[in-house]
Each structure stands twice: as structure tokens, then as C-alpha cells.
Image (tube, helix red, strand yellow):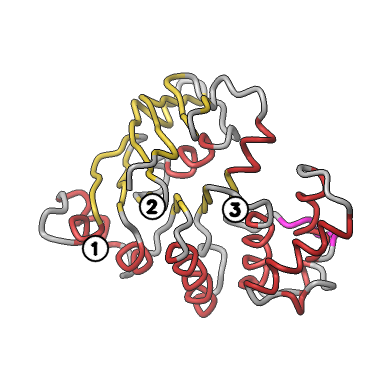
Amino acid sequence: MSDLIIEFRNLGLRYGSFQALADVSAQVQQGECVVICGPSGSGKSSLLRCVNGLEPFQEGDVIVRGVSVRNCRDLAGLRAKVGMVFQRFELYPHMTCLQNVALAPRKVLAHTQAEAERKARDVMAKFKVLEQSDKYPAELSGGQQQRVAICRALVLGPEVMLFDEPTSALDPEMVGDVREILGRLASDGMTMLVVTHEMRFAREVADRILFMEHGRIVQRGTAQEFFGDSASPRAKAFLNRVQL
């Protein structure tokens, strides 16, 4: 892989006097699945949200397909290329599942309602939630809601997918279901950045792992390196505390 999709350049983010991210530099190539892990409060979600401009940062930059996020004048266009799935789904409760998924093609791509609903049905069928089209999010299980949220992000045909703890709000029996979807996307060659404590997914699917602490990347490497003897003592201590 030699096609650079995302580059973090000495990224720094502060909330008042608190330094959430400090001098973060990394690259993501096309087709890579990169897992970001680490203890709570280490800056993982903040790093992810910087990619599509949801978190305004003060230092450095994020470059997405050659476009500076810091100086981007078309954030809507950027976000059409960078899909994001949130920890708690963030579906509109007053809309049906079909309406949730069809909204972005109508608003961002200016599709007609018929065109948007056709695209929405296609992606919902692919991820086995088409039968939930007329239901509202509250009528679905957590796993079904997360599938719909993934469909909503994919319906625009993004080049990159960001996942912020996609299984943390799910019952244990639903985790494997969403993990299977992420594995399928990785197998299809989708470029993905995944913040997760799901170390089984990281071990099986990730091309590379970034381990963060105190707003910095303190270890990076392949899954084999991270889970093997070359892992740092801090990474090993973290792995001992999470379920593999």
C-alpha cells in the first residue's frame, strides 16, 4: 500500500489548559484498518474527531487526501468522504430507519427523495436491516441501531470510515455481530480508523495499532508486534486489563 489517505502532522489539541493531544504524527494508507486503543482519557476519540473537523485543534494539521482539515473551507464535502459511526448511534429518533439513512444523500448530494431512498435501501439490504426500514430507532435492538448507523455513514460512499467505540454501547451478545461487519468492511478494502477496546477485533483484523496514553502515541506497529513479545511494558499492562 502506497496511497496516503490520512496524515496527522504534529497534531495538538487543548481544552483550556488541558492538553488532550500532543505532537501526534501518523499516517494511514489506503485500504488499511488502523486500530487506536489505550486507557480512557488518552485522547483516542479526540484524535478521531479531528479527522473530519468535529474537533477544532490548535496545533499541527490533519491532511485528508491532500486537503488540510485546519484550512478546509468545505467541511461538508470533507465529511462526505469521511464517514463516522458514533459510540451511541446518534440516529434521529423522530425519523424511521429509512429516513435516517436517506437523509444524507438528499442533503449532501442533492438527490431526490426517490433516489436517496433507493440508495438507502441498497445499503440497508447489504447489511441486513432492510426489514427495519419503517421502524423507528427506539424499536430496534442496539445491534440493529448500530447497523443502521453504519449504513447511514456508508450511503455516501466514503473513502474513509471512522468508528468511535462502535461496540461499547452494545450488549455482549451484540458485539460479535458488529465486529463481523467491521471485519467485512476491512476485507472489502475500506480504509478504517477504529477506536476500540475490542482487542479480539484488533488482533484479527487490524493492519496496524496505535496505542495512546496522555494524548500521545506511545507505541505503534502491527497487530503481531502489539500482541507479541515486542509490546512495551505499558501496552502489556493495558492488555492484561482488557478482555481478549
Tell me which amino acid carries mark 2: Glu
Measured in 3D between alpha carbons, the distance from the residue under mark 2 to the one under mark 1, in whole angstroms, is: 26 Å
Q: Disc 2 vs disc 3: which is toward the camera?
A: 2
- Quadrant assignment, res 134: bottom right
Q: Which residues are magenta?
A: 91-95
Secondary structure under the numbered disc 1 in the rendered image: helix
**Amino acid type shown at disc 3:** Phe
Q: Which residue is mark 1?
A: 240
In this rendering, would 110 be left or right of 201? right
Tally of numbered tags: 3
Secondary element at tag 3: loop
Residue 5, placed above or below residue 111: above
Q: Amino acid at mark 1?
A: Asn
Query: Is 122 displayed left or right of 15 in the figure?
Result: right
Residue 194 sits inside the magenta stretch: no
Mark seen at residue 32: 2
Q: Is residue 10 above or below residue 44?
A: above
Location of residue 228 (image quadrant): bottom left
Question: Which mark, by number, is residue 86?
Answer: 3
